[in-house]
Image (cartoon, rainbow, N blue to C red):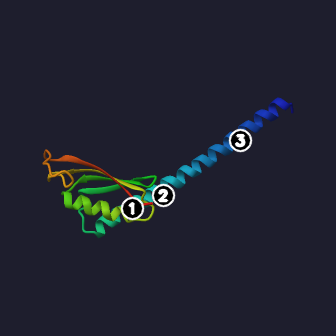
């Protein structure tokens, strides 16, 4: 076998092994995201929040709260999810009909609350 074919074979072998490692890391990260999403939604349910109106989805330790809830429920959900191990940050993308808790100004009905909370490190 010529040196050229051996080099090509080595490159193909490295590329194949590299793809296998990358897909394994992807599967691990995806499984961790699913687990964190499940734990966050369980925490919301255990807190008595309506999980048909409020949902948590995780990606790499960042949990996004989605749905519709009152300001009080949103703050409770955020605190519950922030207390979970593995949560780096919580982003609220929840629709609320109440006044803004942080500003005191009224919002249009069903306006999204956009807030970011980060765990203390």
Give the crowd class for mark 2: few <14, some 14-19, many >=20 residues within 10 Å. some
Asked if disc 2 and disc 1 are in contact, CB closer than 8 Å, the reply is no
According to the picture, the residue beneath numbered tag 1 turns out to be 38
Q: Quadrant of residue 120?
A: bottom left
Tell me where residue 116 appears, x and y as whole percent.
Answer: 33, 51
Asked if disc 2 and disc 3 are in contact, CB closer than 8 Å, the reply is no
Asked if disc 3 and disc 1 are in contact, CB closer than 8 Å, the reply is no
> Could you say which disc has been placed on residue 32 in the image?
2
Q: Check the picture and name the quadrant holding the C terminus.
A: bottom left
**Image height check: is 120 above or below 112?**
below
**Image height check: is 103 above or below 43?**
above
Give the crowd class for mark 1: few <14, some 14-19, many >=20 residues within 10 Å. some
Tell me where residue 82 appears, x and y as whole percent.
Answer: 36, 62
Q: Nearer the viewer, residue 3 or 87?
A: 87
According to the picture, the residue beneath numbered tag 3 turns out to be 14
Residue sitting at x 76%, y 38%: 10
Residue sitting at x 68%, y 39%: 15
Tell me where residue 74 appears, x and y as whole percent.
Answer: 24, 58
Mark 2 lies on a secondary structure that is helix
Q: Quadrant of residue 45?
A: bottom left
Mark 3 lies on a secondary structure that is helix
Q: Quadrant of residue 41?
A: bottom left
**Image height check: is 97 above or below 50?**
above
Marked residue nearer the N-terminal end (3 or 1): 3
In the displayed structure image, the side of residue 106 where residue 113 appears, left or right: right
- Disc 2 to disc 3, C-alpha distance: 27 Å
Marked residue nearer the N-terminal end (2 or 1): 2
Residue sitting at x 39%, y 64%: 39
- Disc 3 to disc 1, C-alpha distance: 36 Å
Q: Nearer the viewer, residue 61 or 14?
A: 61
Residue sitting at x 21%, y 53%: 102
């Amino acid at each position: 076998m010529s040196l050229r074919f051996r080099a090509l074979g080595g490159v193909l072998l490295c590329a194949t092994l590299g793809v296998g490692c990358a897909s394994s890391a992807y599967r691990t990260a995806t499984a961790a995201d699913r687990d964190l999403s499940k734990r966050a939604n369980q925490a919301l349910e255990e807190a008595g929040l309506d999980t048909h109106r409020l949902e948590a989805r995780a990606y790499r330790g960042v949990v996004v709260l989605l749905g519709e809830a009152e300001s009080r429920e949103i703050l409770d959900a955020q605190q519950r999810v922030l207390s979970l191990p593995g949560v780096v940050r919580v982003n609220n993308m929840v629709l609320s009909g109440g006044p803004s808790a942080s500003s005191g100004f009224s919002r249009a009905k069903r306006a999204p609350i956009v807030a970011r909370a980060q765990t203390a490190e």
